[in-house]
C-alpha cells in the first residue's frame, strides 16, 4: 500500500522593480504592467535547472487575483496563469504521477489541481488545499496492481475550513472517512518528514487568523510499511485508558448494557488494573455487566493445561469481587477476514453476545450458559480446553469455563458472576434480572416525580408496577414478589422530606448448576410403590 499527496502550487511572489534570483520551485520576481481592470501582465525571470540560464518571459493572467501587501509585494497564484509569449503553459501538475512502483497513475486522472479553497482565500490565506489517495501498489490488498483504494480530494490544511457546514480539515476527514490510514503531523505541528519548514504556515493553523501561507508539500508518496497491527497492542498507557473509560462512568449520560474487557495489555498487572477499573465503573453505574477474559500470555501458546489453569486462577484472584462482572477462561482461534489471517482473540465479546442473544430469544433472566443458549460461534479451536477437574477448579474461583464439547460445539459451561461470597447475585441470570427490574421500575417511578405523595399517587404506582412483576413471574423470572408502597413506609416524616418510598421484595428464579441422577436396578416383578414409597 502507498499513500500519496498533492498540494496546491507555490504562490508566486513578485517584488515590484526587483530582479533578484529565484529558487527552482516557483516562478518568481518580475515587473507588473496593468492591462485593464481585470487583467494583469507579468514579466519575470524563470531559471532552468538544466541549462542554468535565466529567461525573461511575459505572461498574461486569466484574471486579477493579485494581492498587494503593505510592503509593496504583489502575490499571484500560479494557477491563474494564462499564456506565455503566445504559447500555452505546460502545467506542472499535469505531469505528476502517484509515484507508485508497479504502475503509472497520473494525478490529473484523479482530480483537478488543488487550489486555495474559497474559505481560505476569503480570509487572505493561501495554499491550504491538498488531495490524498491510498493506492494498492502491489495488488496484495485488492488483487489489482495500482488500484485506488481510497481518495480524498480538496481537503484543507486549515483547521477551521468548512464547506456547506462540513469540515474540510484533512485530519478530521481522514479520521472519520478512511478505513486504512490516520493523518497527523509530528511534534511541532509541521509534517517534517516531508521536509516542510517549521516557520509560518504550519498545518492546522486556522485560516481565520488571516494572511496564512500554508507550507507546501508538493507531490509526495509514502509507502505503508513497518506498521504495527493493533491486535498486538499499541503502547496505550493504563492511565490513558483509565481516563478514556471515565467518559462512560456517568450512567445518566448514555445507556449502557455491557463493557467488554477486550484484549490484554502488555503485562498481567496492567490487564488486572484495567479489569478493576472497568468493574469500578460498572459498580458505580449498576446498569451494566463487564466481561473479562484472562491475560493472553497465560493461555495462548502454552501446551500444558495445568499451567494454563494456574495462570487463569492467578490472574483473576487479584481482580475485585463484583456481581456486575463475568470472567471466562477462553481464547478462540478464528479467521480474520479483514487481514486474511488466523488469530486468537479473547472470548469476552462472545460472552456479552451470548447474553444479548439470550435477551432477544428468551429473557434477560435466563442463563446464557449451556448447550441451549451458550454456544459460541466462529470458533476453529480453543487455546485452552479444560477437563472436568480443571473446570471445577476454575468454577470455585469465579471463572466460567469455555469448553469444546464433543458433539455439542464450543459452549459457555458456567454462569457465575465475579462475586466472591455466596448469594443470589453470584449467578448471571439473577444479576441481569435485577438490572432489568430496577431499570424498568425506576423508569415508572420517575413519572411520579413532583406529584403529591398521597394515597392516590401510591395506588397509581402500585397499579403500574404489580402487573409488570406478575408478567415477569409468569415468564419464570421470579417465583414470588411483594410490593409495599403505602402509609407504612411513606410516613409523615418521609412525606415532609419530600420523599417517596416503595419496597420491592423479590424471590428470583435460580438456574440449575448441578444435576444429581441416581440409577437403581430392581428385581423383575417388584412394585415401584414398595421400593420408593412415593406413589
Image (spheres, rainbow, N blue to C red):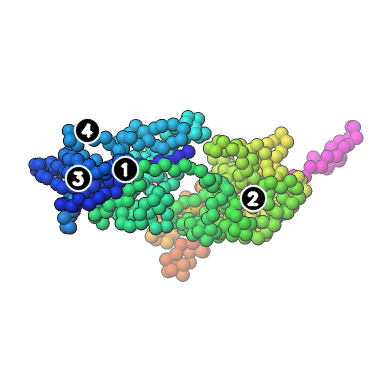
The mark closer to the camera, 3 or 2, is 3
Residue 453 located left or right of residue 415: left
- Residue 146 location, x and y as percent? 44, 32
Residue 88 badge: 4
Q: Nearer the viewer, residue 28 or 271?
A: 28
User: Which of the marked residues, 3 or 2, is nearer the chain's N terminus?
Assistant: 3
- Element under label 3? strand
Say whether residue 135 is left or right of residue 273: left
Instruction: Look at mark 3 in the image and give the residue it sits on.
Output: 44
User: Where is the C terminus found, in terms of image quarters?
Assistant: top right
Instruction: Tell me how far mark 3 sits from mark 4, CA to CA.
Output: 17 Å
Write down the residue under mark 2.
296
The structure residue drawn at horizontal position 46% and vertical position 57%, both measured from the top left corner, is 247
Q: Label 4 to label 2, Cα distance in Å?
A: 65 Å
Q: Position of residue 310 (x, y in %)?
A: 73, 54
Number of marks in the rendered image: 4
Instruction: Report x, y in % for residue 209.
Output: 26, 56
Would you say 299 lies left or right of 19 here? Answer: right
SS label for mark 2: helix
252 relative to 66, above or below: below
Q: Residues within 10 Å of mark 4 (few under 14, many from 20)?
A: few
The earlier-in-sequence mark between 3 and 4 is: 3
**How far is the residue under mark 3 from the one under mark 2?**
67 Å
Q: Does the magenta segment cover residue 521?
A: yes
Q: Nearer the viewer, residue 464 or 94?
A: 94
Give the CA separation, mark 1 to mark 2. 59 Å
Would you call the spot at circle 2 few (<14 residues within 10 Å), some (14-19), or many (20 or more)? many
Q: Which residues are magenta?
A: 512-535
Q: Extreme top residue here?
A: 144
Task: Give the residue at mark 1.
Answer: 49
Amino acid at each position: 500500500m502507498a499513500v500519496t499527496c498533492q498540494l496546491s502550487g507555490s504562490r508566486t511572489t513578485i517584488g515590484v522593480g526587483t530582479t533578484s534570483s529565484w529558487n527552482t520551485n516557483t516562478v518568481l520576481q518580475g515587473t507588473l504592467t496593468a492591462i485593464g481592470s481585470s487583467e494583469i501582465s507579468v514579466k519575470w525571470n524563470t531559471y532552468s535547472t538544466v541549462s542554468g540560464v535565466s529567461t525573461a518571459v511575459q505572461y498574461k493572467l486569466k484574471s486579477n487575483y493579485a494581492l498587494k501587501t503593505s510592503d509593496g509585494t504583489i502575490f499571484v497564484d500560479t494557477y491563474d496563469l494564462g499564456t506565455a509569449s503566445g504559447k500555452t503553459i505546460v502545467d506542472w501538475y499535469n505531469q505528476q504521477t502517484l509515484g507508485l512502483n508497479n504502475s503509472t497513475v497520473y494525478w490529473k486522472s484523479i482530480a483537478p489541481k488543488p487550489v486555495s479553497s474559497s474559505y481560505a482565500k476569503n480570509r487572505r490565506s493561501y495554499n491550504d488545499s491538498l488531495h490524498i489517495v491510498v493506492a494498492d501498489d502491489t495488488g496484495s490488498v485488492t488483487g489489482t496492481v495500482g488500484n485506488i483504494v481510497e481518495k480524498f480530494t480538496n481537503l484543507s490544511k486549515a483547521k477551521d475550513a468548512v464547506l456547506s457546514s462540513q469540515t474540510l480539515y484533512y485530519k478530521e476527514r481522514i479520521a472519520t472517512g478512511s478505513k486504512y490510514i490516520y493523518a497527523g503531523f509530528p511534534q511541532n505541528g509541521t509534517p517534517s518528514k516531508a521536509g516542510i519548514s517549521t516557520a509560518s504556515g504550519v498545518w492546522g493553523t486556522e485560516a481565520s487568523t488571516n494572511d496564512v501561507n500554508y507550507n507546501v508539500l508538493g507531490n509526495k508518496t509514502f509507502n505503508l510499511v513497518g506498521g504495527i497491527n493493533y491486535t498486538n497492542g499499541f503502547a496505550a498507557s493504563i492511565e490513558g485508558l483509565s481516563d478514556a473509560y471515565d467518559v462512560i462512568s456517568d450512567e445518566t449520560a448514555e445507556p449502557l448494557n455491557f463493557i467488554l474487557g477486550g484484549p490484554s495489555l502488555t503485562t498481567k498487572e496492567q490487564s488486572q488494573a484495567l479489569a478493576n477499573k472497568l468493574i469500578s465503573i460498572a459498580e458505580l453505574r449498576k446498569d451494566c455487566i463487564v466481561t473479562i477474559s484472562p491475560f493472553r500470555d497465560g493461555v495462548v501458546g502454552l501446551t500444558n493445561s495445568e499451567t494454563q489453569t494456574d495462570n487463569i486462577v492467578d490472574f483473576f484472584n487479584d481482580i475485585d469481587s463484583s456481581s456486575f462482572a463475568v470472567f471466562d477462561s477462553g481464547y478462540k482461534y478464528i479467521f480474520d477476514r479483514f487481514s486474511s489471517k488466523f488469530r486468537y482473540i479473547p472470548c469476552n465479546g462472545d460472552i456479552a453476545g451470548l447474553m444479548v442473544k439470550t435477551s432477544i430469544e428468551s429473557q434477560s433472566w435466563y442463563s446464557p450458559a449451556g448447550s441451549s443458549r451458550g454456544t459460541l460461534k466462529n470458533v476453529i479451536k480453543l487455546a485452552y480446553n479444560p477437563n472436568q477437574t480443571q473446570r471445577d477448579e476454575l468454577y470455585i474461583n469465579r471463572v466460567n469455563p469455555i469448553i469444546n464439547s464433543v458433539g455439542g460445539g464450543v459452549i459457555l459451561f458456567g454462569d457465575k458472576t465475579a462475586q466472591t461470597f455466596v448469594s443470589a447475585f453470584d449467578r448471571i441470570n439473577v444479576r441481569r434480572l435485577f438490572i432489568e427490574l430496577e431499570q424498568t421500575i425506576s423508569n415508572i417511578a420517575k413519572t411520579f416525580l413532583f406529584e403529591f405523595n398521597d394515597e392516590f399517587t401510591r395506588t397509581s404506582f402500585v397499579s403500574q408496577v404489580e402487573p409488570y412483576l406478575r408478567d415477569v413471574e409468569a415468564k419464570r423470572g421470579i417465583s414470588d414478589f411483594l410490593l409495599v408502597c403505602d402509609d407504612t413506609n411513606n410516613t409523615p416524616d418521609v412525606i415532609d422530606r419530600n420523599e417517596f418510598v416503595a419496597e420491592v421484595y423479590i424471590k428470583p428464579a435460580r438456574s440449575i448448576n448441578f444435576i444429581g441422577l441416581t440409577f437403581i436396578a430392581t428385581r423383575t416383578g417388584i412394585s415401584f410403590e414398595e421400593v420408593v414409597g412415593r406413589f
